[in-house]
Amino acid sequence: MRKTAAGHTTVCGEAVGSTCKRDNASVQLLLVVGRDADLTPDDVARVEWRANSIYLGQYRMSCMTFDGVLNSLRRRLLLASQAS
């Protein structure tokens, strides 16, 4: 990575081919809270609210339990294996 004259970060090299891409970083925020089995009904309501309502500056933050993260990763891996 290097900075351009305008101060933009540029990614160049074999990983992205022979072209350079400017400012293509993506920010993903994740707040992980507890386990599904440990949550009371009030806790579930708070997690659902946080999942739809929390931002850090301009970035939306996902909120999941550890079990939710595991289930999401399993679904993504299953879909990826079916696509190939």
Image (cartoon, helix red, strand yellow):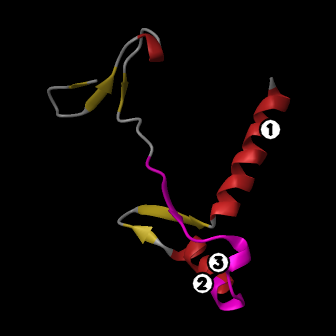
The amino acid on which the numbered mark 2 sits, given as a three-letter code, is: Arg
Circle 1 is placed at which residue position? 79
Seen at 42% across and 8% down, the residue is 18
Q: How far apart in space, not on screen, are marks 3 and 2 (Cα)?
A: 5 Å
Q: Which residues are magenta?
A: 27-43
Q: Is residue 65 magenta?
A: no
Please state which of residues 20 and 70 is positioned toward the viewer in this rendering.
Answer: 70
Seen at 53% across and 76% down, the residue is 53
Drawn side of residue 28 relative to residue 22, left or right: right
Q: Which mark is residue 46?
A: 2
Q: Are marks 1 and 3 in contact (CB under 8 Å)?
A: no
Seen at 65% across and 56% down, the residue is 69
Query: Of helix, strand and loop, which one carries label 2?
Result: helix
Seen at 37% across and 18% down, the residue is 20
Query: Of helix, strand and loop, which one carries label 3?
Result: helix
Query: Of helix, strand and loop, which one carries label 1?
Result: helix
The amino acid on which the numbered mark 3 sits, given as a three-letter code, is: Glu
Sequence-first tag of 1 and 2: 2
Drawn side of residue 23 relative to residue 8, left or right: right
